[in-house]
Image (cartoon, rainbow, N blue to C red):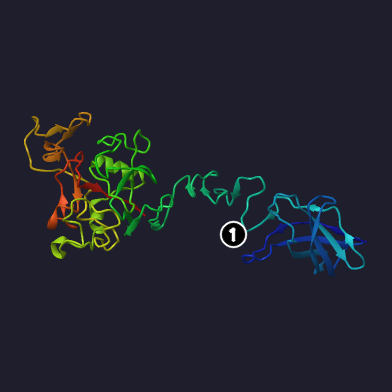
Amino acid sequence: MRELARLLFAVCCLAAPAGAAELLSYQGRLLEGGTAVTGKRVVNVFLCDAAAAGNCFGSGEQSVAVSDGLLRATYTVPSGVDLLGGADWHLELRLYPGGTTTLSPRERLSSLPYALVASSAAGLAARAGAPGARVSSSLYIVAGGRLGVGTESPAAALEVVGGIAASGRITGGCENPDDPGDEMVAVGPWCVDKYEASAWSTPTGGTQYGAASDDYPCLDTGQDCAAGAANPIYARSVSGVTPSRSITWFQAAAACANANKELLPNHLWQAAGAGTPDPGTTGTAPNCNISGAAPHTTGAGTNCQSSWGAQDMIGSLWEWTAQWMPAGTNYTNSGADGTQYNNWPAGYGGDGTFNVGGRAYNGSVWADGLPAAVIRGGSWGDGADAGVFAFVASLAPSRSFSSLGFRCGRRR
């Protein structure tokens, strides 16, 4: 009569190459007639889905060495057993030869000693009825492949709740997965609009504004242009359209921000334009549109392209940049302490400007005490004055006209 006294029963997953079978191990103490066994014995390990009866799956017979009653073996998880499927599994041992001795009762695989280490996450699956699979205490994958870090309900392809730390630069491509037509080019650590921007009613299209006239739905101040405001506008860099123009700096900045971009800093505009043909040295067509009557249609300026691939940075529309600076000629309009002060034009809430000792062009007049927002590149009517070094710092950000547009970018 054989009997098995299990003094220790433990199950764990041994390391295995990706795609290899899962290996489990167990150990116990084998007595025969009350005496500890030493020698070879044949065992077969079964995993059953119930404490009694049910379905059992065998791993196959194997010879094991027993020393002073200590029996230790490693076996392959039988085919048909899904240890992560949510079922309660029980281990049953059968001894050979001389007939089959089935040891009882079955040993339930409890959660404490039972651990699996995945050699590959390629086949990771959620438990039945669960909305997703937990990889660790902070990493969660939900249906559709969305990955959450610090959240079990990611709303995007990757959502991180908490801080992000990196020992190096975090970079990515310049593609827009939500709007493949929104084309950008890589310029160092930035993505820059390939084409002069156009303003739209939705992030992926809809109604275009500013192609032929100043028909923007939001105010020149940009106060109602934001994505959460009454009349949002969205910047896109798309081919085959007339770029939007007659736009104020405030409207352009809002349109870029609504598209998760920003107006280009002056230094970035300069870098992105490098290599664009200069009309002062290369003449006019077919290089850049410095003698036409309207801006280039986007995508038609392939002969007016920078070394980075940005098109029509000169000779189509002047382009707003992010920079503001004091403007114009000094004037005298000061208080007793010598500080110069003035107000923005009507429509800007009567806000004051202080110690801005210059004038900027606003509407059809020069206005005292306004800063200037820098525009770059030159338009279709500027001839040889257009180019990658063309720079104007005389326009108030509240100004707009038919040969003034914008371009956006974002950090990679």
> Is residue 68 visible in the rendered structure shown here?
no
Q: Position of residue 58 (x, y in %)?
A: 80, 61
Which residue is nearer to you in this view: 12 or 261?
Answer: 261
Q: Secondary structure at mark 1?
A: loop
How many labels were placed on the picture?
Answer: 1
Q: Position of residue 349 (x, y in %)?
A: 23, 29
Q: Is residue 156 above or below residue 308?
A: above
Residue ID at (84%, 68%): 42
Q: Quadrant of the rendered structure where residue 249 is?
A: top left
Image quarter in which the C terminus is found: bottom left
In the rendered view, does 391 fall on the left or right side of 7?
left
> Is residue 211 visible in the rendered structure shown here?
yes
Q: Position of residue 135 (x, y in %)?
A: 58, 52
In the rendered view, does 334 fall on the left or right side of 4?
left
Q: Position of residue 28 (x, y in %)?
A: 79, 60
In the rendered view, does 199 fall on the left or right side of 329?
right
Q: Amino acid at mark 1?
A: Ala
Residue ID at (66%, 45%): 129
Which residue is nearer to you in this view: 103 or 363?
Answer: 363
* Residue tagged 1: 122
Q: Is residue 296 above or below residue 61?
A: above
Q: Quadrant of the rendered structure where residue 246 is?
A: top left
Residue ID at (76%, 52%): 89
Image quarter in which the N terminus is found: bottom right
Residue ID at (36%, 46%): 260
Which residue is nearer to you in this view: 29 or 313?
Answer: 313
In the rendered view, does 291 fall on the left or right side of 73?
left
